[in-house]
Image (spheres, rainbow, N blue to C red):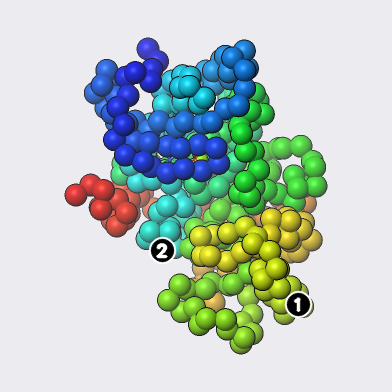
Amino acid sequence: DLVKDEDLSILEDLGAGNGGTVTKVWNKKRGCVMARKLILVDAKPSVRKQILRELQIMNDCSSPYIVEYYGCFSVDVHVGIALELMDAGSLDHIYRHNGPVPIDIVGKVAEAVLHGLLYLYDVHRIIHRDIKPSNILANTQGQIKICDFGVSGELINSIANTFVGTSTYMSPERIQGAPYTIKSDVWSLGISLIELALGRFPFSDSPEADPEEDDEEEEEYDPDPTLPLNTQRPKLDALKHERRKSKGVSLGGGGHTMSILDLLQHIVNEPAPRLVSKRKTFPSEAVTFVENCLYKDPAERKSPQELLASDWIVKSKVTQEDLRAWALSLSSVNKENK
Ligand code: ADP
Ligand code: MG
């Protein structure tokens, strides 16, 4: 039967994000570890009950690409959700602690996310709506799974802060008010894949700034290969100005800031980012794949089925054993398991 909060004792913090805190817990009744997510929900009891009811849909979700659900419950002002613990953590934690993700592994991330999206849509008619590196998790069995999809409309409405600046994986059409489709998730996947491969959020104003290589306020012009030439200089100037005059939103963890409005405007008005780097050459199959995720026109953007049939995915030689070895080699994982 389903997990209750009384069964859980707290082990350690796993992270906090938009309206949620996640803790590693020990389930006394079942004798295993789990992840418990607490979401601050500002709603009356009837709405709370409705949320708990809606979350039960997760009970019917069963796929190797979806983080397993064990139960939900009310904890004072929170709604709690017990989930499978993914012991290698989220992909954003992984690249922040270990540097860019090897491109062949990024390919397996893409494959897993697409399978997860297709499962949710084909079987449950659910659109994920929040694909980003922190909602893609890995474990030391070499599995990659997605979590935090939009199952409960009431929950989406009741989360205390729905807009805390991380909606930056949002597609141009969503920013302009079009309804969510599975193609909006494909856009978010494209942005996430570039972020993993480069080790930084692709829309930051300081291209590929290595923390070590940061020469204070470099006045030298450093072209960003992800931006078209004619937009670079004025863009950088505008961004520097923006950074001085407003606090802005911290992006990509690198301490670079861009106001959320500038970012949304940038996504709508500028060409989409591409998988290119001054330091590395990525395989052309990977570059093409990401390009196909990031057509600004959703009609041109490829569907998950089409993307799964692309060369980058089909020709990958990475096995689950390789993924296992990669997960076990992460310093962020070794630190915890010693
Ligand atoms: P966000 O996804 O916006 O970062 P969340 O509250 O969903 O915020 O999650 C906070 C952090 O908790 C995530 O970044 C992730 O690192 C960690 N986390 C979430 N779910 C799990 C899980 N099932 N297993 C391990 N870590 C998790
Ligand atoms: Mg999350």
Query: Which image quadrant is residue 277 in?
Result: bottom right
Q: Which mark is residue 234?
A: 1
When the figure is inspected, residue 126 is found, relative to residue 253, above or below; the finding is above
Query: Which image quadrant is residue 286 in?
Result: bottom right
SS class, disc 1: helix
- For disc 2, the marked residue is 99
Mark 2 nearby-residue class (10 Å; few <14, some 14–19, many ≥20): some
When the figure is inspected, residue 224 is found, relative to residue 147, above or below; the finding is below
Q: Which mark is residue 266?
A: none
> Closer to the camera, 107 or 96?
96
When the figure is inspected, residue 228 is found, relative to residue 147, above or below; the finding is below
Residue 244: horizontal and vertical position, in percent? 67, 71
Judge from the rendering whether residue 322 lies leftward or rightward of residue 46; answer left or right: left
User: What residue is at 46 percent from the left and 26 percent from the top?
Assistant: 81
How far, Cα to Cα, is label 1 from label 2?
30 Å
Labels 1, 2: front one: 1
Residue occupying the far bottom of the picture: 220
Look at label 1 and name its amino acid.
Pro
Query: Which image quadrant is residue 9 in?
Result: top left
Mark 1 nearby-residue class (10 Å; few <14, some 14–19, many ≥20): few
